[in-house]
Amino acid sequence: MIHLIGPGGAGKSTLGATLARRLALTYVDLDSRFLAEHGVIGEYIGQHGYRSYAASNVALYLRIIRGVSSPVVMVMSSGFMTYEPDIHPLYPRLHDDILRDTRTIVVLPSLSLEECVRETLRRQRERAFAGAPAREETKIRQRFPVYAAMSLRKVETMRGVDALCEELVPWLMQPATGLKYNVACGDSEPEL
């Protein structure tokens, strides 16, 4: 499984769809799946709270990966890697497994905080479901150091999706050396 992680508006969905097409893999966008199952994320959070959203998102991720029988490109929700450890009984393990997987990619517009904030906010203004700019900026500034500190491959989407794919496709075609978390393929199946 290839995981793409990073803030909302970083370019994960665009990059993920293009990588999936070029690698002939299934594309899964966790936010889109949440929308289909639970409705608009902001409305869900407004009705049930952020903790409930995060717990439901982790449970949804688990259902998805249990149903996967072949490699996929998985675009993670922007906050997935920043949830509190107690959000779900299996979250600490999932979090660590994703971080150890050599095919997890941190997607950011730029590795410069200020450029990342500017570009992410610009992109979010073009999206129908973007939140209030001040709140979104605060989230980006809080989460950027978390993503920047991860010992994972990082890509800057301001370079353009075609350039990134030219670099990433050959790298992704190499055998993975990290942990492969795939419940559906016979690893120990966690209990919900």
Image: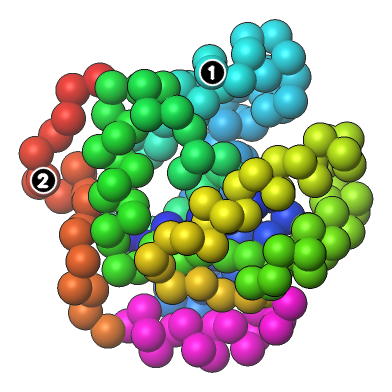
Q: Residue 74: give x, y in percent of width and height.
A: 45, 54
Q: Sequence-wise, which precedes: disc 1 or disc 2?
A: 1
Could you tell me if residue 26 is visible in this image? no
Residue 46's spot in the image, x, y percent? 73, 14
Q: Which residue is mark 1?
A: 51
Residue 118 position, x and y percent, is 85, 62
Viewer-proximal residue, 122 or 25? 122
The quadrant in which the N terminus is found is bottom left
Q: Which residue is mark 2?
A: 187
Task: Single out the residue that lies furthest toward the top.
Answer: 47
Residue at x 50% of width, y 79% of height: 22
Say whether residue 75 is left or right of residue 153: right
Name the one closer to the observer, 56 or 39.
56
143 over 36 or under it: above or below: below
Q: Which residues are magenta?
A: 158-173
The kind of residue tagged 1 is Arg
Tell me the quarter of the picture where residue 180 sits.
Answer: bottom left
Q: Tell me: residue 96, above or below residue 107.
A: above
Looking at the picture, tell me which residue is in the foreground, 26 or 142. 142
Residue 62 or residue 107, whichever sits in front: 107
Across and down, in percent, residue 10 comes to: 68, 60
**Label 1: few (<14), some (14–19) or many (≥20) C-alpha neighbours in 10 Å:** some
Question: As displayed, is residue 151 above or below residue 58?
Answer: below
Please tell me whether mark 2 sits on a helix, a strand or a loop.
loop
The local secondary structure at tag 1 comes to: helix
What label sits on residue 14 in the rendered view?
none
Q: Is 159 inside the magenta-drawn segment?
A: yes
